[in-house]
Image (tube, rainbow, N blue to C red):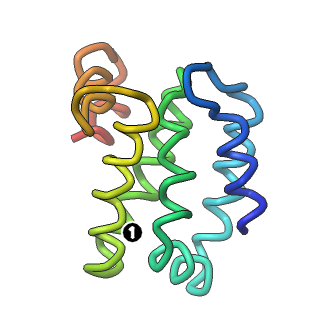
Amino acid sequence: FQNLLNNITSVCLPGSRPNNSALSSLVACVTVVMATKQGLDIAATSATVLNSLILGLISEDEIVKRDILTLLSTLTLHSSTAYRYVLESFTHFKKTEHVTYRFIVLVEDLRRTESVEYRKSLL
């Protein structure tokens, strides 16, 4: 699981655009792992996991971003600790990507997208 997240981190280097195909495959693998109780528990108790996962939001691929948001949303419901880690991961995103606000990626995508499905995920 950690190797998957390390690969996401390496694909999503700060200041660059990730390879959407590789990122899509990695997020799909993380989704499969998190579909198990053990995978969900690991993700819910590790800020490092979420800090790696959230970097995928720099992708231009709305499907990848929607999948990441679904995973993050699932974690917020899993436990109060996971909820806190998700919020902290947005702060990590803010620092890593050198943006002003931690939720700016969500707000900008909400303004920009025409996809109804992606808008629902953002809201």
Image location of residue 45, percent across then percent down: 46, 79
Residue found 31% across the figure and 47% down from its top: 91
**Image height of 25 relative to 11, above or below:** below
- State the residue position of label 1: 75
**Image height of 16 relative to 37, above or below:** above
Given residues 38 and 45, the one toward you in this image is: 45
Where residue 115 sits, quadrant-wise, is top left
Given residues 81 and 27, the one toward you in this image is: 81
**Image height of 11 relative to 42, above or below:** above
Residue found 38% across the figure and 38% down from its top: 95
Residue found 64% across the figure and 31% down from its top: 13
Image location of residue 23, percent across then percent down: 69, 37
Mark 1 secondary-structure assignment: helix
Image location of residue 72, percent across then percent down: 40, 58
Question: For the N terminus, which image quadrant?
Answer: bottom right
Residue found 56% across the figure and 79% down from its top: 42
Residue type marked 1: Leu
Image location of residue 105, percent across then percent down: 33, 29
48 relative position to 32: left or right: left
